[in-house]
Amino acid sequence: MSQKQQRTDYYLSLGQSQTRKTSSMCRWAVCFPLFLLWRQLHRNHITIFFAHGVTDSRLPSSWSPLRGQLAADYLDRGLTVLARYYRFLSLDQAIEMLAGRQPMQPHGMVLTFDDGYRNNFSHALPILRRHGVPAVFYIATGHIDRREPFWYDRLDYALQHLTREQAISFCGQLFLFYPGNEHSLHATFAALRATIKADHRDYRETMKDVDTIAQTLENNAGCRLADCFEQDHYTSVMSWDEVRRASREGITIGSHTVDHVLLDRLSPPAAMEQLTGSKQRIETQTGMECRHLCYPNGNWNESVANLTRGCGYQSAVTIQHGFSTAGESLFSLQRMSFLDTPDTNALLFRASGLR
């Protein structure tokens, strides 16, 4: 390619980039009044955002999960913009307002992180500290005690190291995995996860079958996530020392049950054991009362909500999209996912209720 052609291509790409930037600015100029209107309409509602893992793409790694995590840069950028329009609250403050025990502060927002990944401590906490934003870390205590990965991370790791095609049967459905085809792996893995979560058997029976699937995939791959789990910055979970340090820095430590189980798929005594066991373990390890629960996968029903209340929790959150409003049940609070995108305008739209 000639130097003249290279210069032409360069200026053409520069012009296209500028055009896209100008177009984005024009769209925001048009939509901004609508955002302000929606924000005002929902001023007395509380937005609860949730995320799972928080990653840093600059860190070296031999793999990248199919199940996405929130980029640390996007979290940092998002908090900067959200702080201009919203008031960050601790979950305790929000519960007092939702229960009517304190006046509602307009434009309230709460930040929550599910699962208890170590990267919440290593990547998210410094960003939260820098912005002065309180947050909740919901942790599955059994995974911290046993130092073992979650089943979906275990499958994810094995799938990406397959040495040959693998067929998996679950609940009468056949799932075919082809190594090296990321698009196909992503779609089929998402379908398998959805089918596992939709299984209506006792959850402990479901997990026995999942363990068999994991072993089959690991035999094919010739490796296991468990062998590198502690060093893996995507999937490792916090230690109790890190949990305590986060608690001392003002992070609220909530329960995500003992074993990250779907509570509505357990008998009441088994569900009670998960609720009380995790609560007591957190309180023993942190010296702080554990008052808040996150239902794994958002699965709950009225029986589970009643058990949760009876165990001494003051709130429980779901993954149902929406705002939290005064007067509603504190044991079925709605949340919104924190978008993994550099487009902060999209994040503002979501926070306001705009689709």
Image (cartoon, helix red, strand yellow):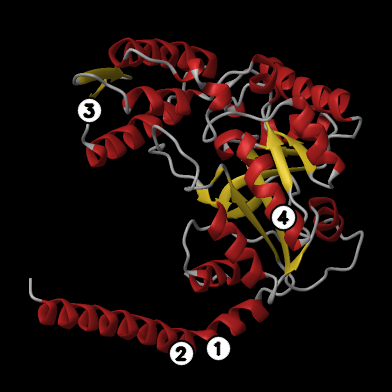
Residue 210, quarter of picture: top left
Counting residues from the N terminus, which is met first, the one under dot 2 or under dot 4? Answer: 2
Q: Is residue 104 visible?
A: yes
Instruction: Report which residue position mark 4 lands on.
Output: 128
Label 1 – label 4 distance at C-alpha: 29 Å
Amino acid at circle 2: Val
Circle 2/circle 1 CB separation < 8 Å: yes
Q: Is residue 328 above or below residue 220?
A: below
Q: Residue at x 48, y 89 (%)?
A: 29
Q: Is residue 8 left or right of residue 23?
A: left
Counting residues from the N terminus, which is met first, the one under dot 2 or under dot 3? Answer: 2
Instruction: Report which residue position mark 2 lands on.
Output: 30
Q: Secondary structure at mark 2?
A: helix
Which label sits in the foreground, 1 or 4?
A: 4
Label 2 – label 4 distance at C-alpha: 31 Å
- Count of numbered labels shown in the rendering: 4
Which mark identifies residue 179?
3
At label 2, counting other C-alpha atoms closer than 10 Å, the crowd grade (few under 14, some 14-19, many 20 or more) is: few
Which label sits in the foreground, 2 or 4?
A: 4
Residue 128, quarter of picture: bottom right
Relative image position of residue 145 (x, y in whole percent): 70, 17
Which label sits in the foreground, 1 or 3?
A: 3
Label 3 – label 4 distance at C-alpha: 38 Å
Amino acid at circle 4: Leu
Instruction: Report which residue position mark 1 lands on.
Output: 33
Which label sits in the foreground, 2 or 3?
A: 3
Q: Secondary structure at mark 1?
A: helix
Label 2 – label 1 distance at C-alpha: 7 Å
Counting residues from the N terminus, which is met first, the one under dot 1 or under dot 4? Answer: 1
Label 2 – label 3 distance at C-alpha: 45 Å
